[in-house]
Image (cartoon, rainbow, N blue to C red):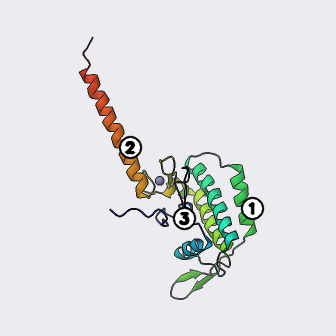
Amino acid sequence: MAKEDKLAFRFDCGAVWLNLLATRGRTFSPNPVERLATPGRLTEWLERCELSPTRPPDQHDLERAWKLRETLRALALATVDEQPPPADAVADLAAFLAQYDDPVRLAADDRLRREPPATTVHALARIARQAVDQMTGSDRLALKSCPEDDCRGVFTDPPGRRRWCPSPACASRGRVRALRARRNAAAAQSNDDQTPAR
Ligand SMILES: [Zn+2]
């Protein structure tokens, strides 16, 4: 089996804003994986999301993207856990959105399009608005977080069937652990059975 490329972007979390969260892997481990390490990687990621800004991202834009990502992560985890959102994250997001007004201007040629974002922060503001819509409406009920403690990746699961995030590494680690726990339980049970009754 091909080894999973740790630095590959994930586009399978269910929404662009969730895929942004997934640009950092193993977030809660001592060694998180940064998939948006350079402005060039951010350019590539925005391109894949069809959100290329007119002016390409610089280092400052990259730092803004990291900040927004972690703000959205804190809010998303609170939403999934049905906890009140952290006040600093709410304030951050509100201030960011107030700064970047981005009216919807539609264009239609071969298909329906929206005018490209002028700058990276405008692209980020579109992603932030998508996140707000999802977290404040009924779509929030389809959000889940990965049970792996070092991941906690947020994804959508409308049918309610997935347990782990779409990263194959999390599902396989989780399944191995569950199997081991079942074996240990079975071994403990058979030891009990062999204990003579007193
Ligand atoms: Zn995971």
Q: CA distance from mark 2 to mark 1?
A: 42 Å
Name the secondary structure under disc 2.
Answer: helix
Of the image marks 3 and 2, the number of the one nearer the N terminus:
3
Residue 150 locus on image (x, y percent):
51, 49
Which residue sits at x=72%, y=58%? 92
Crowding at mark 2 (Cα within 10 Å: few <14, some 14-19, many 20+): few
Image location (x, y in percent) of residue 89: 69, 54
Q: Which residue is mark 2?
A: 177
- Number of other residues with Cα within 10 Å of mark 1, as a class: few under 14, some 14 to 19, many 20 or more: few
Determine whether the beta carbon of the residue marked 3 sits less than 8 angstroms from the nearest atom of ligand 1: no
The residue pinned by badge 1 equals 95
Residue at the outermost top position? 198
Residue 107: horizontal and vertical position, in percent? Answer: 60, 85
Please state which amino acid type lies under the numbered disc 1: Ala
In this picture, is 104 found above or below 147?
below
Instruction: Name the residue furthest bottom.
Output: 109
Q: Nearer the viewer, residue 197 or 16?
A: 197
Q: CA distance from mark 1 to mark 3?
A: 26 Å
Q: CA distance from mark 3 to mark 2?
A: 27 Å
* Direction from residue 118 to residue 5 in the image, left or right: left
For disc 3, the marked residue is: 35
Number of numbered tags placed on the structure image = 3
Disc 2 beta carbon < 8 A from ligand 1? no
| Residue 161 seen in render | no
Left or right relative to 82: residue 90: right
The picture places residue 147, in percent across and down from the top left corner, at: 47, 47
Secondary element at image label 1: helix
Disc 3 marks which amino acid?
Arg
